Amino acid sequence: MTLQALDTVFYTGTDLSLLWHDKFHDYMRKSFPVLTLPLGGSTANRKGFLATYSIEDDRLYLNKLEFQNIAKPYPFVVGIVGKEVTEYDEFTGWVQYQPMHEGLSYTGYIVIGKSQVRHKYRDMVKQFHLCRELIKLKLVGGYVMEKTDFSAEAKTIRKQVEKSITRLFKPQTAEQLKSQRELIYRFTDKVKNISN
């Protein structure tokens, strides 16, 4: 599976990646119907768009939308009054709508973070333990209601995995590899648990 480009969320002055959500992209497609059109795209961007968000005073805002558009003329972004294409790259076909500061009313969970290896194309779904910053937010009507910081726990798990890998430079047994995977998957499930 091709690694997926991730959206960016500016939170407490830091640019983090949107690593996981329970239904956020469905919300975005309903709020901005242009995102459901056959706009082209890339195997590294199955959702069809890239977005930049910010969280200011515990409110979620949309700041920029980008997508590859194969149809001209380029449409207004439905739901954003008066916003037209502000930049178009002839070589790649990427279109940008910006600047924006649209308050969003999403209700659900998102996980944001920054990995040890900073790269826009990094599929982190099963690699939460690699994040040096890892935060889960519960949003109601676009406002942050709960924040859970998993950064310290991710670091602990990362150290456990690294220790077992480098122990005397001996090859790992199948049992050791299985134990590492289970540790990582348990942590991933804990972060993604929306019943807590």
Image (cartoon, rainbow, N blue to C red):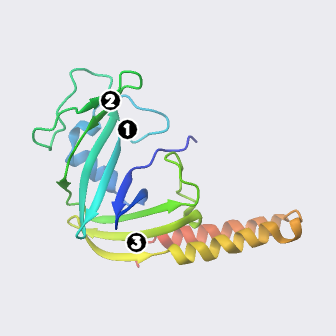
Cβ atoms at labels 2 and 1 below 8 Å apart: yes
What residue is disc 3 on? 194
Find the residue positioned furthest to the left: 81
Mark 3 vs mark 2, foreground winner is 2
Cβ atoms at labels 1 and 3 below 8 Å apart: no
What residue is disc 2 on? 39
Of residues 61 and 89, the one nearer the viewer is 89
Mark 1 vs mark 3, foreground winner is 1
* Mark 2, other Cα within 10 Å: few <14 / some 14–19 / many ≥20: some
Of residues 3 and 190, the one nearer the viewer is 3
What residue is disc 1 on? 48
Q: CA distance from mark 1 to mark 3?
A: 26 Å
* Mark 3, other Cα within 10 Å: few <14 / some 14–19 / many ≥20: some
Q: Is residue 63 left or right of residue 20?
A: left
Q: Residue at x 72, y 68 (%)?
A: 162
Q: Is residue 24 left or right of residue 75?
A: right
Q: Is residue 97 left or right of residue 156?
A: left
Quadrant where the C terminus sits is: bottom left
Image x and y of residue 113, in percent? 46, 63
The earlier-in-sequence mark between 2 and 1 is 2
Q: Amino acid at mark 3?
A: Ile
Cβ atoms at labels 3 and 2 below 8 Å apart: no
Q: Amino acid at mark 1?
A: Gly
Q: Is residue 41 above or below residue 118?
A: above
Quadrant where the N terminus sits is: top right
Helix or strand or loop: what does disc 3 sit on? Answer: loop
Residue 160 placement: quadrant: bottom right
Image x and y of residue 95, in percent? 31, 31
Q: Amino acid at mark 2?
A: Leu
